Image (tube, rainbow, N blue to C red):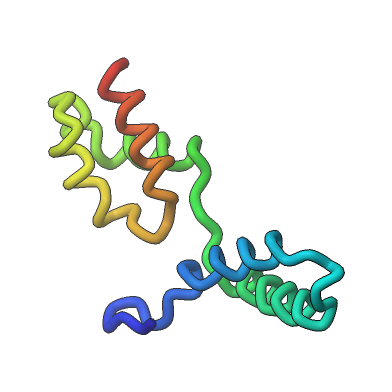
Amino acid sequence: METPKTGYQVQSYDVPVKRYCQTLDLRDSPELIAEYQKRHDIMQEYAPKLLSKEEVVAIVQEKFADVIATKNKGQIMKTIMPELKGKADGKVINEVVTELCNA
């Protein structure tokens, strides 16, 4: 899972490992759980931290104030996503844009 622009996408691997660790029952295989927990911990250490909702609001209002003024959600998302892709969760970005459009 390598992309030419960003190299390996650690973040996309982290979620399935975390979800798998949470679904395992301790009675099943403690060794397997320990292995996946170790993988998850390593991913957490090297994976980029995602921006919080407040940070996304600040960036959007600072850099994209002219686009937000249009209140066109599609145009706003099209402009913002290249800047914030991989830095913030898409759901958070969508939520912020929706709030700013309705404000």
What is the residue that sits farthest to the top in this orientation? 103
- Residue 41: image x %, image y %? 70, 72
Q: Quadrant of residue 92?
A: top left
Q: Quadrant of residue 35?
A: bottom right
Say which residue appears at 59% left-offset and 74% top-offset: 46
Q: As drawn, is 89 to the left or to the right of 99?
A: right
Quarter placement of the N terminus: bottom left
Q: Is residue 90 above or below residue 19?
A: above
- Residue 8: image x %, image y %? 42, 81
Say which residue appears at 84% left-offset and 77% top-offset: 30
Q: Is residue 24 above or below residue 31?
A: above
The foreground one among 23 and 58 is 23
Q: Quadrant of residue 9?
A: bottom left
Quarter placement of the C terminus: top left
Q: As drawn, is 32 to the left or to the right of 1?
A: right
The foreground one among 16 and 79 is 16
